[in-house]
Structures are given as C-alpha cells and as structure tokens.
Image (tube, grey):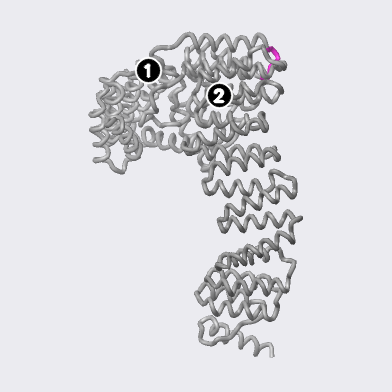
Amino acid sequence: MRRRSALIAVVVLPLILTGQVRVVPQGTNALRQAQFLEKRGDVEQAREIYRRILADDPSNVNAYRRLKTSLIRGGELDQAIELVSAQLRIRPESLGDKIELGELFYLSDRRNEARAWWQGLEDQYQTKPQYYRLQVFSLARLSLSQEMDSLAVRARRRFDDPAFLSMDLANYYYSRGAVRRAVNEYINHLLVNRRQKKYVTSRILSLSDEEENHSLIEQILVERLAENESLLGEILADFYFKTGNYRAAIGQHTRLGFNHRNDLTRWLELAANLRAEGQIAFAIQAYEIVLHDDKPIDLPPGVIGEALLGMGRCYENQVTKVDQPRPLLEFYPDNVIFENHFYDHPKLELEPLLTAFQIYDSILVELPGSILLAQVHYRLGEIKYRITRDFDGALLSYRAGLRANPAQATRVQLELRIGDVLLARGDHEAGLAHFLPLMANAAGAANPYLLKVVQANLLAGNAESALTLVETTLAEADPGDRYFNDLMEIQDFLTTYYLDAGSAGQAEFAVFLQSEALIKQNKLNEALVILNTIVRRKAGEEIIEMAALRGALLNLRTANPDGALALAEVLSEGKMTDYGFVITGQILERLVGDQPAAVDSYHRLLENHPNSILAEPVRFHLRELNQSLGS
C-alpha cells in the first residue's frame, strides 16, 4: 500500500506542476507547491491550494498570510477583506488583522467604512499603547499624515506622554523630507529619552546635508532651546559646526558654559575637531578658552595637559600646512620604504614653531607626572626630526618618550622614529641593530618593524638581504596583512631592477641605492647628482628610467623646472612615456604657471595612453583645471 501511494505521488505531482491535471495537493508539502506555482505564474491554482488548506485547517497562519498577500498584490481587495473578516471570526483577538482590515477598507475606496472602523478600534483599544503604534504604521503606509498627527495628539493626551509616537512620526517625516515636522518630533523624543541623543543628533544633522534646510533647522533649534538649553544647545552647536559656521559653534559652546567635568570634555572635543578640519585659529581659540582661569570648576592636570598638547599640535599645523594639493604622480606613493618624512618649507614661519616648543616645554615642566609626557616628547621629536632637521635633538626627545612609560601605540611610534632618525643620519648599521630585535619580537607582514629592516638593508646597499627577507615574509603572508601591498611592490622593484638586471644593471642599482640613502638624509641635491649620472652614462638599461623618474620628481619637489623637464624628456623617449607626460604637465602647471600647456600635456597622455593607471586621476584633474580656466 505504501509503495502504491509513493507511485501515485511520483506520477501525479509532475502533472500537477505542469498543469495537465488539476489536483489540489494536500499534506505538509502543499504550501511549498503553492509557492512554486506562484513563482511560475499560476496564481489562481496557488490560491486554490491556499483555500483548500484553510478549509481543512482554518487556523493555518502561513496559508492565510500567503493567500492574503496574493490577493492584495493582485488587486483583489474585496476578496482580501472577506478573507481577513473570516480570519477575525476565528481569531477575534488579532489586533494586527483588525488594523489591516481598516487599511483594506481605505484602499478599496470604502473610506467612510474605514474611518468608522478605525474609530471603533480606538474606542475599544484606547488604553492599549500597542494599538496606537500599529495604527500609526498603518496610517503611514497610507500616507495619511493629518490622521497620524491627530492620532498622536489623542494618544499623548490619554497617556500623558508628550513624546509618545514621536520617533515613529519623526522617521516618517524624515523619509519624506518634511524637515520641520521631522526635527520637531525628534526633539519631542529626545526631551523624554535623553539616551537617544547621539541618534537624534545624527538624524537632525543629516537633514542639514541639504543647504536649503539650514535656516529652518537653525530656527527650530533656537525656538525650542529654552525647553532644555543644555541638551538642545549641544545639538545647535553641532549643527553650526557641521554647516561650517565655526564662529557660531564656539559662541554656542561658550553659552553652554563650564558647569561640569563633561563640559571640559565637550570643549576638548570641539577643539580637536576644529584642528582636524584645518580651522587652526578657531582650534587655538577653543583651547585657550579651556585653559583660561575664570571657570567655576577646577581644571584637572589631565585636561590641562590635553589642551596644551592640542594647542601645540595647532601651532605645528600652522608650520606644516601644505598649500599645494597632492601631486598626480609620486614615487611609490604610500609605500613605507619611500615615504618622505620631511616638510619642505621655502619660508619657515618661526613664530608658531617657537610657540609649539614653548607649549610642549611647559607641559614637561608643569606636569611632570602626566600620562601625556610620552606624547609630548614624541611631538617635540617630530618637530626636531621633520621640520628643523635636528636629528640629535630628535633622538633625545624620542628616547625620553620611551622612558616616560608610553602606551603601546605611542611606544611603537617612538621605536619606529628612533630607527628613522638613525637612518636619516646615515647610520645604517645602527638602524639595522635597532630594528632587528624589534622585528624578531613581532610577527608576519603586519610587523611594523619588518619593512624598516628591509629599508635599512636597501639604504646600506644590501639588496640581496632585503630581497631574501621580502620573499621569505611573502611566502607566509596573508593578503589582508597591513604591509602586504608594500612588500609586493618592493619585491617587484627588486626583481625588476636588481635580480633580473644583469651585472651592469646590478652595479647601477647599487648606485641608485646610494641616492636613496641621500634622499633619506634630506640631501636632495647630492642625490640628484647621482641620479643624473645614472641617466647620463646609461650603463644599466632597466634602472635608467627609474632614476629619471625619481630625479624628475625630486626636481619638482625642489622647484627646479629645468632639471625636471630634462628628466621628463628622458622618460618620454622610453617605456614610461605616460609618466613623462604627467610630470611635464605638473611642471608646467606648478612651476612654470602655464596651465594651457599643462592641459595639452595631460591630453597627450590620454590620447597616447588611455589605459594608463594615471589616466583616471588625470581626467579628474583636467576637469578641475578646465573649470578654473573657464572661470
């Protein structure tokens, strides 16, 4: 008998699915079969299955929901109403079905019946908050804003809760761009639910992405400020900051005052954010306000130290500010081994530099036990190393930072910089001796000291040792490791210009590494002499263009247009002509000031090398140039 039933199922089911026999399946697979039929487009047959399931089991929720959805999707609203009404006779306690029935009345143009139904539900469930929440969602789906507002007013009065349904209404109006209503409802919610401050602030500020909303948002916040000045005042201050009105932001923070320790944190965050935005003058003003001695609360040493450290960073930023945008072409950009640590200053501003020194020194003298001392020594070291090129003084500061019990992240920064300074002094063996034990205690391609060991070997002329270390590391590295891409670039660099270069090429590569050692010491003119010599004598074919590229970029950096153009011409005659066009364009644009000629050079790149990796950044830069030329 069982075998016969199985045979019937095997024969009948395919016929059902192909439509040759109209049989309604039953059992546990019926729902699955009906869903399959719906997907295939046999909607009526699927509905028939759902109805048969409900006839046998009226409480089958899955079949009910599937059939209801199918009818609504197909526009069969009267049938959907009958179905929901029948279900309510079985489950009269189902509030969700009651809400949906009113929605179906409205959608089927039985508006008076819908409103009467809603009134009856509200009379029945007027003490149940859940009813109002479900009903407001239903009204939102129907876009009945006025009815939603009226419902919220009645519910708030009944439950004596001025923020009831506020988040639901706020998000509804937010999605529809109704700024005034959204902001007001977010404020209603926040005044009762202060823990939601971060979320509410982000929602209000995101509405300010559109400039035409600025005046309205400001007006609402100012109008309602008196309801909770500390809470809404912070949002108003954040709004001013977000919209770039930094003076007003500082003014609003000033009105909020200094009454609690949290106010100090608020000011420090404001100052740090201003500095991050490059608003150095405003950041210094904010730090000065923090440090001023007219406050009703005492300043803890940690706050004083953080404010002084931040102010010192501001004066550093004034010195290190770069007016020129990042060049289109760099030598192995963002690779740790070739990064430039030094700031190039035709006219170094002495006053902010001296002020930064004085501020850091005052922290060291006045806060001898501060946890910020290691950071202060690091900042002093950075000024001496990267700005004034006082390598001996920098080493003293970095080593003092290590003795000040630094946090782990600061310790790593200090250890890396000590090795950098040793290499910058030309003491490659000392640099290796410094980095090797640090590398041994770390692991993998995420090891911050590994690339420094590679760099030290290269600067010392040990190309073979550097290549061996790179290949050994890559054999076990994961592509997700922090320095994986840097290692891949160095492996390709060493393979191309050293390993595969032949004896003459390897000899010239060793000379090229001498120029790199000089660049690391910031002896750029001496490095250029070596690079020009490599290009002129043409002894190692592979390294010639690399030397020309490195030299052209150094000439661009040192504002030597003639030297840069001469080396760019060498590139235009070899395999790297696309690089030559870009360097020529950069020279003409930045050093010569001939923008039309620069544009022409960029266009030559696009015409001759449309697939170059430089093509896309050049296209973007050309759009900017054309806009400036046309204005």
Rendered view: 36 above or below 427 = below
Residue at numbered disc 2: 416
Rendered view: 16 above or below 247 = below
Residue 272 lies in quadrant: top right
Between 357 and 198, the one lying in front of the other is 198
- Is residue 535 in view from this perspective? no
Residue at numbered disc 1: 524
Rendered view: 385 above or below 441 = above
Residue 626 lies in quadrant: top left
The stretch in magenta equals 367-371
Question: Neighbour class for label 2 at 10 Å: few (<14), some, many (≥20)?
Answer: some
Residue 53 image offset from top left, x and y in percent: 66, 78
Residue at x 55%, y 46% (from the top left corner): 174
Residue at x 47%, y 27% (from the top left corner): 455
Give the prevailing secondary structure in the magenta stretch.
loop
Q: Marks 1/2: CA distance? A: 23 Å
Q: Amino acid at mark 2?
A: Leu
State the quadrant of the N terminus: bottom right
Horizontal arrangement in the rendering, residue 121 relative to residue 629 (left or right): right
